Image: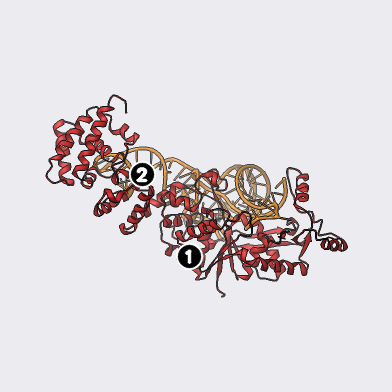
Chain colours: A red, B orange
Amino acid sequence: MAEIRVRFAPSPTGYLHVGGARTALYNWLFARHQEGTFILRIEDTDADRSKPELTAAILDSLKWLGLNWDEGPFHQSDRLDRYRAVARELERVGHAYPCFCTPEELQLKRSRVGSGRPWKYDRTCRNLPEPERQKRLAEKIPYVLRFRVPETGETSFEDRVFGAIKVENQEIEDFVLLRSDGQPTYHLSVVADDVDMLITHVIRGADHLSNTPKQILVYNALGANTPVFAHLPLILGPDRQRLSKRHGATSVGAYRDQGILPEALVNFLALLGWTPPGGEEIFPPEAMVREFDLAAVSKSNAVFDPEKLAWMNSQYLRSLSLDRLQPLVEAELEAAGVQAATFLPGESFQKTVALLQTRARTLKDFSQGGRAFFSDDFEYAADARKKFWKDPALHDLLRQLAERLESVEAFDIAQTEECLRKLAEEKGIKAGLLINAARVALTGQAVAPGLFEVMALLGRQRTVGRLLRAAEHLSSSAPAKL
RNA sequence: GUCCCCGUCGUCUAGCCCGGCCUAGGACAUCGCCCUUUCACGGCGGUAACGCGGGUUCAAAUCCCGCCGGGGACGCCA
């Protein structure tokens, strides 16, 4: 069997969004599974909308996800001559013809058809008498090259995911191959490239399903073999509309900024439309590659669920080694403007990260909820104050706790706990009351690691200082209902 | 509107091709309980789906038809 060759062909008119990322991933998985070649091609034939910096951003996102390619990136803008030559050849053999209709004329005809618009190009120029055609050519009237679609018959193909697809040729319009400025359209450039690059499998979004018959017509006209097509169901927003910026974060970069790990995003995306035979949920890329099968891809569109992504991220975050996690946290803190380095000696930093790790859902949790572990500049969360600082006696209790902790012999987990419990007992209150209030005092949060671990980590001076600060805060704002 | 495609818990899905093992399985979310110093983790348990209607059959989530619902395409965008 010939070598398997697939490609991912984004157009640089926007950032890499999760739908594109999933398409790239499935191509990559298929290529790796088949030990084939994964090619990257930039479809930038729309000069107006394509931006070089977006190409760079897309490559960046792909690398971040770990989707390495074997050939490319190729740029369609480098191959314009080739497309023109292909178009001319199609014209020469009668599969394409010049069309002099202007965009304005077409627009007019289109609107005249009415609101419900079964519009198809009316083939005015296809039926132009030859002398007239020659005349216009000689007059150098601008024109596009349109594909001459057969008037009868049907075009069908066997999609690897969707199965048999069939369309009557009458339903297909004479689409444009070459624009009047000599630029190719998508239908021309994809086919030309896929033929030239020996692509064996075209794996792309289902939004291309209805374009496929047109392209097959071009393959046939070129006398080329058609590749295998596999269309992927679309990714939808919660409203079941196609996922778009309206739904919030859609780009890979946005998820990175939200503290999502690439391996979590990859895992999540892999499962959006595909389930491995064993039904695993969390599994590494090697396993995905081993088990990936296009035939097992789902046909129905899938709603993107950020909640599940977050859960998956927490799973990955938890299983990360400290060596790998630490730099990520450092970067996150830096991005959040927290100067952890001057706050914590190296060793405690690691312990702190480890303590926070089991509770984190995203990297953001380190710089936000975990801020008090890396800086003295933090605030008391409203929900935490409300929940644990209700008791008016607390300001006095926290002060006394601080005083007693001053004189604890060894400031470790065991002794700080003993100290606190003893105080609670003497006062005849539940230890939990004090523990929870102290946690808010030390971390600003209702949600945090075990109190005595926190104390041991912060050390005597900071612990005492924060307790006193909280006590003061409580007495000064005590009358106000919290 | 026309053409193409899709339709199992709120969500992602298994099962469908090769009808019976499906009183429909798993995961996320959700609810309750346990653990407990908060939260998370973990453990246990619960709520929750075959879009509707006809067929075919001893038997249908699984096969056929219709309807309804959803999505995509209909550009000198890709």
Where residue B11 sits in the image (x, y, percent)?
Answer: 50, 47
In the picture, measured across the screen, residue A362 lies left or right of residue A97, that is left
Q: Given contact means CB atoms under 8 Å apart, are the residues at marks 2 and 1 in contact?
A: no
Which corner quadrant of the image does residue A283 belong to?
A: bottom left
Q: Tell which subunit mark 1 falls on.
A: A
Task: State which mark lies toward you, 2 or 1.
Answer: 2
Q: Mark 2 — residue?
A: A368
Residue in front for this viewpoint, A315 or A448: A448
Q: Mark 1 — residue?
A: A68
Where residue A312 sits in the image (x, y, percent)?
Answer: 41, 52
Q: Secondary structure at mark 2?
A: loop
Q: What residue do we see at 48% from left, 57% from top? A: A61
In the picture, measured across the screen, residue A338 lies left or right of residue A293, that is left
Residue in front for this viewpoint, A191 or A478: A478
Where residue A482 sits in the image (x, y, percent)?
Answer: 32, 28
Query: Looking at the image, can residue A151 be seen?
Result: no
